[in-house]
Image: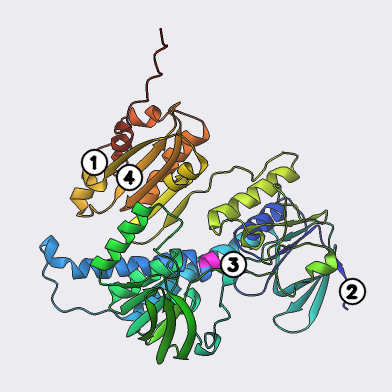
């Protein structure tokens, strides 16, 4: 073992929480070691959130070509060049990489490329990417190692060399027929994008409907959207085995309540869940406990079972959103400075970047009913938001759940740029403002935000208390 080098803090992983922790501590003049085995900045700017949205936007441009006559534009013959789509995405990623390098340089935090494993509660050995090892010591260690696409132990699946989102975003040729295993966020975003580029697409979902944890009206709207875009959906389908090789010919053997079937395509994308990156890290040598699913156990302050070691982001089992990882960083940062922040009960907004988008915060109708929570439902079609008519993007709806005392319990929007509607609603919810605080705003016309006035103007009146009996 090499001679231990002493640091004020060691950060394993440079994902959202890890990089901000490194930058924060480094800018305070502390000696910080940031260990990264893959790409600086983690998954989001390199192989996940931002690259995927770049490709999704290219697909949106392709959809405008398909709809050209609707806008009075005769565009003539056109085609999609996937190599150029990929180059456009890579250019954005290169720019983000430079931003991250500059932030590390300004903060003074040291980047160490390699795989970090714990030897004890204060010592990390790094197997350097360039060869050799380094041994680091600190009384403060922060773990942010993220997660990866799950490859289920289905006969033939691993041998078929399926695409994950990482490989799908690197395609330079268009799949003839893309099979998508999984009807969640990743699968739906990429399924729609590839269809708009020109691939045949079939989604294979093991549950009875897409996004099965969402309210039924959301799933129904998504099914209709994908039907209209000629995307085939196979539901209630359990993949029992896989034949062939993705990129050539691949066959999925599936079991459904109506019987067994074989689905054939050229490429297979697996998007059925996430697995935490916590293997072979020496967690047990440091005394860090994990859950049965392999996530690192943390309390509401993101402290592990070992004093002086924190874990943040996907590896803790928190909702797999970059913005949640960023809030993890803020929670730990503030608590290090003497605050008493907790992750319990925090808002978890979400946005799926299909076209149109699906944005949500707070309770769903399904959850409210299950909990026995009283609510009033307000709902309007996106068609009622006049800005959508100017854009010819009228598909979808907005709905809100309102408590008897006029607080906003939940909000969902399925429509163009739906994610941009969330912050105003979140602010009202965080401050326990009544829905009327948004309803009575003067909002610029014509903007999508006017939809907030519309939906909150549609809230049914509160039930009147029963009259006392004589």
Which residue is the site of mark 2? 3
Q: Quadrant of residue 444?
A: top left
Residue at x-position 69% and y-position 67%: 294
User: Is residue 458 shown to the viewer in this render?
Assistant: yes
Which residue is the site of mark 3? 42
The residue lying toward the viewer, choosing from 74 and 287, is 287
Q: Kindly check if marks 3 and 2 are in contact, taking CB atoms under 8 A apart as contact.
A: no
Q: Kindly check if marks 3 and 4 are in contact, taking CB atoms under 8 A apart as contact.
A: no
Which residue is the site of mark 1? 446
Look at the numbered disc 4 and give the secondary structure of its residue.
strand
Look at the numbered disc 2 and give the secondary structure of its residue.
loop
First along the sequence among labels 1 and 4: 4
Against 176, is 422 above or below? above
Q: Identify the magenta region.
A: 41-45
Real-space Cα separation, disc 2 to disc 1, in angstroms: 65 Å
How many other residues sit within 10 Å of disc 1, few (<14), some (14-19) or many (≥20)? some
Magenta stretch, main secondary structure class: helix
Real-space Cα separation, disc 3 to disc 2, in angstroms: 28 Å
The residue lying toward the viewer, choosing from 162 and 210, is 210
């Amino acid at each position: 073992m090499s001679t231990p080098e002493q640091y004020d803090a060691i950060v394993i992983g440079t994902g959202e929480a890890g990089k901000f922790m490194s930058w924060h501590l480094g800018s305070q003049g502390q000696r910080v070691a940031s260990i990264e085995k893959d790409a600086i900045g983690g998954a989001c700017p390199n192989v996940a959130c931002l690259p995927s949205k770049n490709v999704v936007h290219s697909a949106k441009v392709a959809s405008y070509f398909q709809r050209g006559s609707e806008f009075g534009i005769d565009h003539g013959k056109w085609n999609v060049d996937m190599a150029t789509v990929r180059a456009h995405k890579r250019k954005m990623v290169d720019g983000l990489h430079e931003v991250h390098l500059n932030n590390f340089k300004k903060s003074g935090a040291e980047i160490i490329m390699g795989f970090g494993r714990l030897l004890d509660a204060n010592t990390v050995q790094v197997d350097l990417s360039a060869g050799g090892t380094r041994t680091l010591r600190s009384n403060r260690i922060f773990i942010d190692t993220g997660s990866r696409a799950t490859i289920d132990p289905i006969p033939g699946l691993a041998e078929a060399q399926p695409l994950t989102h990482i490989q799908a975003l690197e395609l330079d040729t268009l799949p003839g027929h893309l099979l998508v295993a999984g009807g969640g966020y990743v699968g739906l975003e990429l399924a729609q994008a590839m269809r708009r580029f020109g691939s045949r697409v079939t989604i294979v979902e093991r549950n009875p409907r897409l996004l099965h944890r969402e309210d039924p009206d959301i799933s129904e709207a998504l099914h209709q959207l994908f039907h209209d875009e000629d995307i085939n959906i196979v539901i209630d389908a359990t993949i029992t085995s896989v034949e062939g090789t993705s990129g050539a010919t691949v066959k999925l053997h599936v079991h459904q309540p109506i019987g067994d079937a074989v689905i054939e395509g050229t490429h297979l994308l697996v998007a059925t869940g996430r697995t935490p990156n916590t293997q072979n890290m020496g967690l047990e040598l440091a005394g860090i406990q994990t859950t049965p699913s392999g996530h690192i156990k943390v309390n509401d302050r993101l402290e592990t079972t070992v004093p002086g070691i924190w874990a943040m982001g996907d590896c803790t089992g928190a909702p797999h959103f970059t913005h949640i990882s960023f809030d993890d960083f803020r929670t730990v940062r503030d608590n290090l400075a003497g605050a008493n922040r907790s992750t319990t009960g925090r808002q978890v907004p979400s946005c799926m970047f299909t076209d149109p988008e699906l944005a949500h915060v707070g309770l769903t109708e399904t959850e409210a009913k299950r909990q026995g929570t009283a609510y009033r439902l307000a709902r309007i079609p996106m068609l009622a938001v006049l800005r959508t008519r100017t854009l010819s993007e009228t598909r979808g709806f907005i709905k809100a759940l309102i408590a008897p005392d006029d607080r906003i319990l939940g909000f969902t929007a399925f429509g163009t740029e739906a994610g941009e509607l969330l912050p105003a609603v979140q602010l009202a919810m965080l401050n326990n403002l009544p829905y009327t605080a948004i309803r009575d705003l003067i909002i610029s016309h014509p903007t999508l935000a006017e939809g907030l006035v519309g939906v909150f103007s549609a809230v049914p009146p509160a039930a009147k208390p029963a009259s006392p009996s004589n």
